[in-house]
Amino acid sequence: MAIYETGIECCVLPLRQLPVSPRRMNHDSPSGQHNEIATLLETGLAHHRAGRLDDAQAFYRRILELQPDHPAALHYSGVLALGQGDHARAAQLMDCALAQSPGDAELLGNRGVAAARMGDHAAAAALQRKALEIAPDFPNAHNNLGNALMELGDLVCAEQHYRRARAINPRSAHFAFNLGRALEKAGRAPEAIAQYQDARALAPDDTQTLMHLGKLLRAAAEPAQAAACFERIVLHEPENANAHFELGYVYDAMHRYEEAIPHYQRAVALRPEAAGAVNNLAFALTALARYDEAEAYYRRALELRPGLPESLFQLGMLLLRRGEYAEGWPLFENRKTTTTGKPNYRKRSCAEWQGEPLAGKRFLIVREQGVGDQIQFVRYAGLLAGMGAQVHAWVAPELASLAATVPGVARVLDAAPSDESIAAHYDYWCDVMSLPLKFPGRPIYAPVPYMRADATQASAWRERVDALAGGARRRIGLVWAGNPRHHFDAFRSLPLTALLPLAALEGNAWFAIQKGPGAAQLADVSGRWPLHALGDELDDFASTAALIESLDLVITVDTSVAHLAGALGRPVWVLLAAQPDWRWGMGRSDSVWHPSARVFRQPALGDWSAVVSALEAALATESDPAGRARA
């Protein structure tokens, strides 16, 4: 999976201080020098405003030669020191100025900025409050007080002062940005987005605004809008590694891997030590089935950050895809420690099995991930029982009755057992997808069938299917869409209309066993394909299994039905994207997991036409996909 790499930029961006705005101050001086000092100050301020800082410094220095305690010259010399990063010198000069003009709000405000830059946020807040006592409508002081309060953790008061600054000067992009930061930190993302959008309207090319706005839009599932933010940064700052990373990341989220790759590559070129960017480049290459390149980058990411879970996990799946089980299975365990995976896994209250002898032991197989995964891996119960264990399997409720038919399963749990129950009833536990790791040298254990449909249900379905099929030679079940929440569902599912050419083949009766949102697509082929829709009648996997037993063939995309048909030992043709899940291997037309499966692969990502053509040819030439006469 692609990961979000916070290390590629500062974890917490500092709040921007509104640039101080020099202005002329009243001062007392000997009458003989008054006009000269006034002229020097006006000239110095003009240079200061124009950005000619060395010239401004020269004029302020001349004033201080004439009058060493001149408050305005001290103040603005302090402002220049602040801009040069000499915060201690700035504070010293401003303190001298305050000794002469303690009631100057602007001077107090700028001294507060110096305190903030030296890390004394309590002093900064106190100084800004003094400025506001003198000038209640001073917007800079409200803004900078908000900054100090943010650092002190008082988000509520910080928001109030940012809002006050915005009300006084609604045309300030700085104020809108800082209010957005306060709202973002408070977890009020929609309000923060609105403020950042206001700031962008006022300053369209401000990098910090675009960066924060883009990240929030991405998190709000608005990838296209997020991409527009990062694209603008990259346009104006082509050397901005953060922006290249973010743009690659958002293209990644939109499955625009070809576009993501050059931005990840640029981020890596600019920040070669950024392991997250290297990992994400590998992930994008994996998504395009460029496995050799991907492997090199996963290994590079692990050189940069040994133990990075995402890289270990992805590399593990890449190796399993190649059939390199000895290295792949241990790395696959890192699915439990990735950012997205970690919340779904925890230790149980008895010992986790590491391969110890099991004679007379009580063993719990723990469910994980999707139902298809549980179907695929629960087969190992037979090996555990063969070692002398009493095996209980915790599975999804809709799979429970069917899991009870798996050899070696003594009892099925359809709900999570409590820690107390596990401690009292079991000696060992193991996550279901970790079982292959525990049997080195036997990575796949697949005698079929290892699940069995209920004979009575299967008989009833056979009568029903025969009646609907009429004189058709073959009865074919069809599933065209998987879980829409799956990250790669856009690639592994296909529109039902793409399969319409199959409707013209003679001698087939078609049965839609599709469930979920994909079933709505039946309306798209109404009147053009006589599909018998049975999905709504399938309450659990036991009823689906009984229906499959009555069919000659199941054609399905990569979803749980593929594993169910395989576990039943029934003929199943699986339609795969060009970059399918690791368990289907590489380049082969069969499956090491399911002997009864035949695989049809896309030649290019998103191209289902070649798959449909291959299906047409196979159905036209193979009268019996099962390789045997129908009973």
Image (cartoon, rainbow, N blue to C red):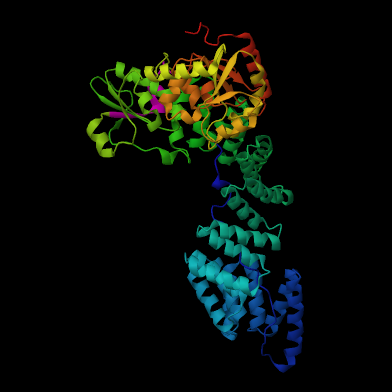
Choose top left, top right, bottom left or bottom right for residue 448: top left
Q: Position of residue 423 (x, y in %)?
A: 25, 35
**From the viewer's perspective, is residue 9 above or below residue 198?**
above
**Magenta span contains residue 441:** yes
Expressed as whole percent of the image width and height from the top left, the position of residue 592 reads 49, 16
Residue placed at 57% from the left, 69% from the top?
A: 162
Residue 105 location (% of width, % of height): 60, 81
Q: In the figure, residue 98 lies in which quadrant?
A: bottom right
Residue ID at (25%, 36%): 421
Name the outermost residue toward the top.
Answer: 629
- Image quadrant in which you'd find residue 177: bottom right
Taking the image as drawn, is residue 115 in sight?
no
- The residue segment tinted magenta is 428-443
Q: Residue at x 50, y 17 (%)?
A: 467
Q: Is residue 405 left or right of residue 616?
A: left
Front-lying residue, 145 or 22 = 145
Q: Is residue 358 visible?
A: yes
In the foreground, 366 or 14: 366
Considering only vertical position in the picture, is 446 above or below 12? above
Residue 21 percent across, percent down from the top left? 68, 74
Choose between 111 and 627: the one closer to the eye: 627
Q: Quadrant of the N terminus?
A: top right
Give the total of numbered labels.
Answer: 0
Tell me if 135 is positioned left or right of 329 in this view.
Answer: right
The question of residue 8 being in magenta is answered with no
- Asked whether 81 or 161 is in front, the reply is 161
Seen as rendered, the residue at the extreme bottom is: 31
